[in-house]
Image: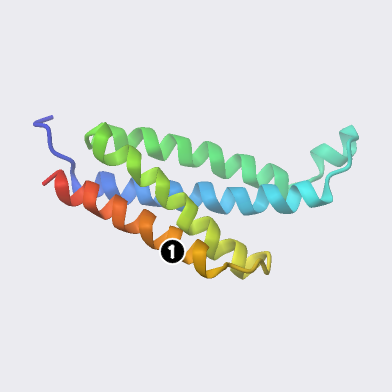
Amino acid sequence: MSGETKTWAIVVAVLSTALTSTGQILLKRGADQLTLTIHGLITNWPLIGGYALYALAAVLFVLALRGGELSVIYPIIATSYVWVSFLSMLFLSEAISYVRWLGVASILLGVSLIGWGSR
């Protein structure tokens, strides 16, 4: 590779973070339903789904690394904080404060600057 990050690699990395964040929402739902028995663990579909999404996201992230520079692709993981904020608000009815929204904006700005600086 010639030291550049391909657009598809960035898209796949963002998709990976969206899946990881969705997996986190499922893990939270699964944790809320968790009973510490064998039956409770193997029938906890949100927990199983969350782990499956984490595995799929890991595979996609490795593919993204093939198409881009680590210093560009890896900071995209920070967007998972953004995804989780939105998904927590939508699916877990969590309140997102003004200060958290400033944090989300800071993350987006930082990731954007890293991507812009790599061109």
Give 67 or 28, whichever is nearer the viewer: 28
Q: Which residue is mark 1?
A: 102
Query: In the visual, does 40 lie left or right of 82?
Result: right
Closer to the camera in the image, 17 or 49 = 17
- Tell me if 50 is positioned left or right of 71 in this view: right
Residue furthest top as drawn: 1
Residue 27, given in percent of the width and then of the height, sits at 68, 47
Say left or right for 88 vs 103: right
Report x, y in % for residue 100: 51, 62
Count of numbered marks? 1
Q: Is residue 11 left or right of residue 84?
A: left
Q: Residue at x 66, y 66 (%)?
A: 94
The three-letter amino acid code for the residue at tag 1 is Leu
Q: Quadrant of the N terminus?
A: top left
> Where is 107 relative to 51, above or below?
below
Q: Position of residue 87 (x, y in %)?
A: 56, 63
Q: Residue 49 appears at what percent x and percent y?
A: 65, 47
Determine the residue located farthest toward the front in the rendered image: 99
2 shown above or below 89: above
Check disc 1 and report its element: helix, strand or loop. helix
Determine which quarter of the picture holds residue 96. Answer: bottom right
Q: Residue at x 30, y 50 (%)?
A: 111
For the point 54% across and 56% down, which residue is it?
A: 84
The answer to whether residue 22 is above or below residue 100 is above
